[in-house]
Image (cartoon, coloured by chain):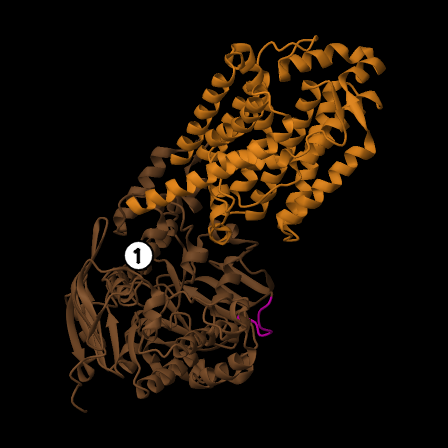
Chain colours: A orange, B brown
Amino acid sequence: MTRILGVVGLLVVLYAALYESNPAATSTRSLTSLANIQGRYGVVTLGAALVIITGGIDLSVGSVVGCSTVLFGVLMTDYGIPPLPAAGLVLLFGATVGLVNGLLVTKLKLQPFLVTLCGMFIFRGAARMIGSVVGAQSVTEAHPEFAPSLDAMTLYLVGKDEKGALVFPAMFALLLGLAAVVGFFLHRTAYGRYWYAIGYNEQAARYAGVNVDRHRAAVYVICSTLAALGGILLFLDINTHQADTAGAGLELYAILGAVLGGCSLRGGEGTAVGMVLGAMVLPVIEKLVNFRGEKSTVIPVVIGTTLLIGTIVDELIRRRSRLNR
Amino acid sequence: MTAPPATPRLRATAVGKRFPGVVALDGVSLTLAPGEVLAVVGENGAGKSTLMKIIAGVYQPDAGTVELDGQPVQFPGPREATAAGVVLIHQELNLAENLTVTDNLFLGREPTGGGGLRVLNRRAMADRAAGLLARVGLPADRLRKRVELLPPGEKQLVEIARALGTAVRVLIMDEPTSSLTQKETERLYTVIDALRADGVSVLYISHRLAEVTRCADRVTVLRDGKNAGELAKGEITHDNMVRLMVGRDMKQFYPKDKRSGVGGAPVLTLAGVRYRGGPDVPASLEVRAGEILGMAGLVGAGRTELSEAVFGVRPLTAGELRLDGKHLRVRGPADAIAAGLLLVPEDRRLHGLVTEAAVGFNLSLPNLDRLGSLLGVRRRAEAELHRTWIDRLRVKTPSAAQPAGLLSGGNQQKVVYGKWLARGPRVLILDEPTRGVDVGAKAEIYALVDELAGRGVAVWMITSDMEELLGMSDRVVVMHEGRVAGELPRARLTEEAVMHLATGGTAT
């Protein structure tokens, strides 16, 4: 609970700073566009956070996002597969990646850090191999008949009309919907209990009859599938993408979002609400830096520093509450 | 016996310590003469560990004084206590597992040269380390071994050797034998005898009263943070200690009220079972309805491993399990649990409980299949389950939301029983059912097991506690080096008979 209050406090401070830097930044329009970006980050964060709750880690998220973006574009442009089936194939790709990660971690008992670090390189490389630059425009140039369904998909998933103007923050709505589902599973069903139990004490879960391997593998599948969905959203949201950079570094954003939202890297802790709130932090920081007219090169420093301060404050609060117990 | 010296080595007077919400110590006093071994016993929560931590500088007392050789002392931390010759060896050993024995012996006080460079003086370390190991009876080839490669008993001895390296005057041992084999325990006694002869005073905390009888010169009993009494050498008996610890006579300590003691039909049968990583000899035995089958054997005899194979943790490679005479396939714990074959594991904190999670979380964990619906876990049914088992087992916890790891050992163990009893066991495998459990909770657990057997549950109880084995078992199977060495009916059940089989003697 205190964890949630912490991230809420951080968000309040950040939004206040945003308002203070330039009231235009807090116009409804600007905030909706921000919310949409938060939604896109959040979708990826949910998956990464579930893996963290079971005591694992997934470093391949960013590369899977990038690879999915490129794959989505290439499937439509070069192979002439219509948008909807193409999206289905991309999600299947994500699920397969997750399954392989999960099996390597559970059956071969490899360390998740190493397995997904390798994945991070492999899928970035794969993205470069299958295409270099992709975008909605090259799709519709090659296949004009795809335009209507691509536009519809953009409207419903990303909330932008055919001219690229934001109609409503669909990605934020999507995040809330997915978070509600994740929250239901996490807090209301036996699955969630098993995930927490595995994260806290895998042995005790095994001795209580929990099929640890199956649940561990399942969260990797969920994580990579959500990353693939993130790749599709990224494709629809922005005009052109380089295979080198699409989704780069997103794994760290996702992990940081999860941790800010109260997940412990030791496993066993975290809430769905926290994940959403945690994922909202980084886009605000980025926007704040932009609006203050700083160069975007300072963003990593600002993010790192904010997190470090957040971590220190969190630890201090925890020590104090332990003393008062 | 010479007259006691005028000033004791250690004297604690009217020591008080309160933590938020609890009075841990309420005016406790003790004295310790040079070269004396004083055992401090009491139920969990009686304040033993707190008192030891105050003496060793881990905690500061709120009231009272501690004197060392007549000088009042108040150590700001364990470091200062160690410097003054008061060393505490923790229940959980504090060795750096990845370093060698020699490195550990001098950790934090390495002999160095080269001024600020602190270059290790390896020769001095090696020489002194050899001497220290010799004093605790460890061979010199251990010096270069990494600590993680040593068996638990030797780690304990390394800890003692480290204490000896600091010119120790008072050595405090908190449950030193909890992870030791019988042989290692014997070795520890020898070392304690040698320490006593060297004039080192020893404070010894143990739940195992038989050990206390063996090695203590005097016993101080604590109860609810107060002195409950003292026993001189000649008065140290199991009954005397238990009476002081619980403040009443323990009649019916090993009850046999609810069960007949004669087993019914076999419920669980092991027919020629072998398992991966196990011995070549197949094991066969049966557990009958309504009986308590005790299983004895030395540590390493393969009792835990066999029970884990039956529970599905270790895969079977040969033989068959039968439940009520019908073949039972167990591919994992989930299958065993579904068949009503439940295991209370030996290592509660590692296998039995999710200690960070709430009591209720643990009670629910294996029962979620019965609490679930399309709309998730039924909260009302779940709360009902928590209430039922916390009440029926008299688990002392502020609420079901309390993290299980914060309960005392006995109450933790009750939670492990609760999560299984909620399922209604057919066969209950108890592996060291009362390890680390205080006397009061022990009696409650024995009564519970008796009641379960009385209701027809087949109980398979693995235990290294001889009194428990003799007191509770209706029939005993003894294991030796992975095989079933023999079976003893109640009528022929004696300590000698058990040890005869457990040490490789032939059945008579």
Give me the chain letter of mark 1: B
Residue B366 x/y as whole percent: 44, 46
Q: Residue at x 47, y 46 (%)?
A: A197
Comparing A8 with B464, the one in front is A8
Measured as percent of width and height from the top left, residue B42 is found at: 23, 67
Residue B123's place in the image compared with A254, above or below, is below
Q: Is residue B278 in the magenta section?
A: yes
Q: Is residue B215 above or below residue A253?
A: below
Q: Is residue B138 visible?
A: no
Residue at image mark 1: B408
Q: Which residues are magenta?
A: B277-283
Q: Is residue A139 left or right of residue A232?
A: right
For residue B188, side relative to residue B220 (left or right): right
Residue type, mark 1 in image:
Ser
Q: Magenta stretch mostly in which secondary structure?
A: loop
* Quarter of the image that includes the C terminus of chain B: bottom left
Residue at image position (22%, 60%) is: B61
- Pick the residue in front: B67 or A248: B67
Seen at 51% across and 34% down, the residue is: A306
Q: In the rendered image, is residue A314 in sight?
A: yes
Q: Is residue B254 magenta?
A: no
Q: Give how far across and how far down residue A123 sits, in percent.
A: 74, 38
